[in-house]
Image: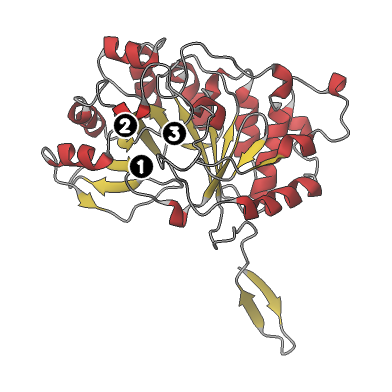
């Protein structure tokens, strides 16, 4: 809201128009910023077993990511989420988290992680201003967890979850991708684990982002309608109007703190009220997870900068926090909203599916 004095000395309050609105009237107030395409896991639905990562010169510096985050908040975005790959493997990432946590107008700073680094980093993340944290976990069986993640250790993730629980985050949510033949018999076990600890859990349908090397996605994708039926055999679920920044649709278990969420891009298209965009670590602003519409922000960020003098990592981010954000950057972000498509087209035979894997997209 804004106020002004009219000609009769009356105070008049008028609504502030949102700055980021797409062609379909959707107000964008949530941005996911990828800080790396690298990860210490190789989850079968996210990466192929042999991965080639971006060369260092193509990856945005932490300062450049900060500039984008600041530009978005100055354009009215109230929620930022840091993603990857695995964001916590990025060198000096806490400098970025601390700087973003100080941005005026930012209501929530969020993080998605595989949890393996949280024993050491949960406390510093909370101190830096992270409000809510999502932790990916797809099995509670150590051998099966290793099969799904290829390189992950379940004990490290479970210890990380406990470390996060001790840090007083506003909410902690577990993210689980249920896949036929991998973990579809663990729906209840994973739900029990979350409920017993007062954690939220969201079940996410596998999306056709890139070609998996271990399986055909159409053979393993599992509808959340089926997952919901399994949970309802054990728990009474009440539909709730609770919403977070993202696309989860939540149910509440009476008498429990935990909420059960479902992210269902395959079975229930939720594009009509999409409020988010995401930036890949090479500075590509993706307007839709399931489409290739994008704007190149890296080109604007590096205009006129000698590549030989560009910093590979930002050691003193606080020195740059008072620098004004480029007007050209904000203009490009505003213009990019017109590129946002009406909806995705996952698994539609006559539509070209994205070839980028999830680690390149930003989780």
Q: Is mark 3 on a helix, strand or loop?
A: strand
Disc on the earlier residue, 1 or 3: 3
Disc on the earlier residue, 3 or 2: 3
Residue 311 visible in rendering:
yes
**In the rendered image, the vertical position of residue 194 relative to residue 115, given as above or below:** below
Displayed quadrant of residue 188:
top left
**Residue closer to the observer: 65 or 217:** 217
**Residue closer to the observer: 288 or 253:** 288
Which numbered disc, 1 or 3, marks the residue closer to the eye?
1
Q: Residue at x 49, y 36 (%)?
A: 353
**In the rendered image, the vertical position of residue 9 relative to residue 347, given as above or below:** below
Q: Which residue lies furthest to the bottom in this view?
A: 8
Instruction: List the residue tagged with mark 2.
Output: 221
Residue 257 visible in rendering:
no
**Distance of label 1 from label 2 (alpha carbons):** 9 Å
Displayed quadrant of residue 246:
top left
Characterize the local packing of mark 3: few (<14), some (14-19) or many (20 or more) Cα atoms within 10 angstroms: many
- Where does the image place residue 286, in percent across and percent down from the top left? 59, 41
Does the residue at mark 1 contact the one at mark 2 (Cβ under 8 Å)? Answer: yes
Displayed quadrant of residue 317:
top right
- Where does the image place residue 237, in percent across and percent down from the top left? 18, 47
In the displayed structure image, the side of residue 62 where residue 292 appears, left or right: left
Q: Residue 266 carries which label?
A: 1
Instruction: List the residue tagged with mark 3.
Output: 133
- Where does the image place residue 243, in percent across and percent down from the top left? 38, 51
Query: How is the protein colored in the picture?
Result: secondary structure
**Distance of label 1 from label 3 (alpha carbons):** 24 Å
Disc on the earlier residue, 1 or 2: 2
Q: What element carries label 1?
A: loop
Characterize the local packing of mark 1: few (<14), some (14-19) or many (20 or more) Cα atoms within 10 angstroms: many
Q: What element carries label 2?
A: loop
């Amino acid at each position: 809201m804004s106020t002004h004095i009219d000609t009769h000395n009356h105070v008049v309050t008028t609504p502030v128009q949102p700055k980021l609105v797409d062609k379909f009237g959707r107000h964008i107030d949530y941005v996911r910023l990828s800080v790396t395409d690298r990860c210490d896991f190789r989850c079968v639905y996210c990466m192929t077993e042999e991965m080639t990562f971006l060369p260092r010169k193509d990856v945005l510096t932490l300062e450049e990511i900060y500039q984008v985050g600041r530009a978005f908040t100055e354009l009215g975005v109230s929620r930022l989420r840091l993603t990857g790959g695995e964001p916590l493997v990025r060198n000096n990432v806490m400098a970025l988290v601390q700087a973003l946590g100080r941005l005026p107008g930012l209501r929530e700073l969020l993080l998605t992680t595989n949890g393996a680094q949280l024993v050491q980093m949960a406390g510093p993340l909370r101190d830096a201003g992270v409000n809510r944290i999502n932790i990916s976990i797809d099995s509670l069986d150590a051998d099966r967890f290793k099969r799904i993640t290829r390189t992950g250790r379940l004990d490290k993730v479970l210890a990380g979850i406990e470390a996060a629980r001790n840090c007083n985050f506003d909410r902690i949510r577990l993210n689980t991708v249920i896949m036929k033949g991998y973990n579809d018999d663990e729906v209840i076990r994973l739900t029990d684990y979350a409920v017993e600890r007062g954690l939220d859990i969201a079940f996410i349908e596998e999306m056709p982002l890139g070609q998996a090397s271990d399986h055909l996605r159409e053979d393993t994708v599992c509808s959340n309608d089926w997952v919901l039926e399994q949970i309802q055999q054990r728990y009474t679920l009440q539909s709730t109007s609770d919403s977070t920044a993202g696309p989860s649709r939540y149910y509440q278990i009476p008498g429990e703190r935990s909420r059960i969420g479902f992210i269902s891009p395959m079975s229930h298209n939720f594009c009509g009220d999409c409020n988010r965009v995401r930036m890949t670590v090479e500075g590509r602003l993706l307007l839709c997870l399931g489409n290739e519409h994008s704007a190149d922000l890296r080109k604007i960020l590096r205009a006129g900068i000698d590549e030989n003098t560009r910093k590979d990592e930002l050691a003193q981010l606080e020195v740059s926090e008072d620098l004004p954000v480029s007007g050209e950057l904000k203009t490009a972000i505003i213009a990019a909203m017109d590129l946002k498509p009406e909806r995705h087209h996952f698994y539609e035979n006559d539509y070209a599916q994205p070839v980028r894997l999830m680690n390149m997209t930003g989780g």
